[in-house]
Amino acid sequence: MTQTTSYTLEAFIEDARKVFADSDDAKVQAQAIAGHMEKLLQVLNLLDGILEIPESGTAVASLHHDDDYGHPAPGFWLMCNAQTQTGATVGVHPHDHGAAWVVYGVYSGAIQQTTWRWQFHEPDRTVPHLDEAGQWIQKPGEVAFFMPGAIHAQKNVNDGPSVVIRLEGQKLTGVVRHSYDLETESATVVA
């Protein structure tokens, strides 16, 4: 990954605000933000003095909350987190983001992303099942985004801390979303 100091956090925030102002399409927004985040992930020492990486556990730092722009309503949130324990999940596992979308960029370390989808198996197509749809490792500089309703989970697969920068199209606090139990194939509302 080539690192730079020419792109700033403030420039990323302005680019994100412009994306929200220029389009109401969630896919267009998420793709454009992902492109800008790729540049942000290359900024050397971006999180110095912002995120203190603990010796164990998780740390979270807010980078920007915007009251004017977002999707599906104003209130996008840019934050970062560090997970130090290998194999630990971050947040609810697995989950969706309701009507919002989220972009994840790995600043350092590596995370595994896993996705699921509802499927109807033969012969009884009246009972939906949660099937794993994909799994991959996100490495430094790599970005992934999850559209409204997409079911996923992430976990640290690095031997040491992994730092992720994430932009929620709308701050998820108060957004109706779901947590999924893979054993019972059930969905519980989270708000």
Image (cartoon, helix red, strand yellow):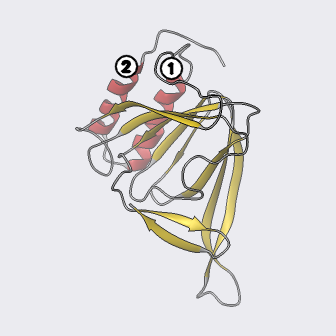
**Residue occupying the far top of the picture:** 5
State the residue in front, 127 or 67.
67
Report which quarter residue 83 is drawn in.
top right
Which residue is disc 1 drawn over? 47
Q: Is residue 80 left or right of residue 176?
A: right
- The type of residue carrying mark 1 is Leu
Q: Is residue 109 left or right of residue 10?
A: right
Q: Which mark is residue 162?
A: none
Q: Earlier in the sequence, mark 2 or mark 1?
A: 2
Which residue is disc 2 drawn over? 11
Write the residue at 38% across / 58% down.
Answer: 99
Q: Is residue 72 left or right of residue 177?
A: left
Image height of 175 relative to 137, above or below: below
Write the residue at 68% across / 81% down.
Answer: 121
Where in the figure is residue 176, as x and y percent of width and height? 37, 62
Write the residue at 36% across / 19% down.
Answer: 10
Image height of 52 relative to 89, above or below: above
Secondary structure under the numbered disc 2 in the rendered image: helix
Q: Quadrant of the N terminus?
A: top right
Foreground tag (2 vs 1): 1
Where in the figure is residue 186, as x and y percent of width and height? 57, 74
- The type of residue carrying mark 2 is Ala
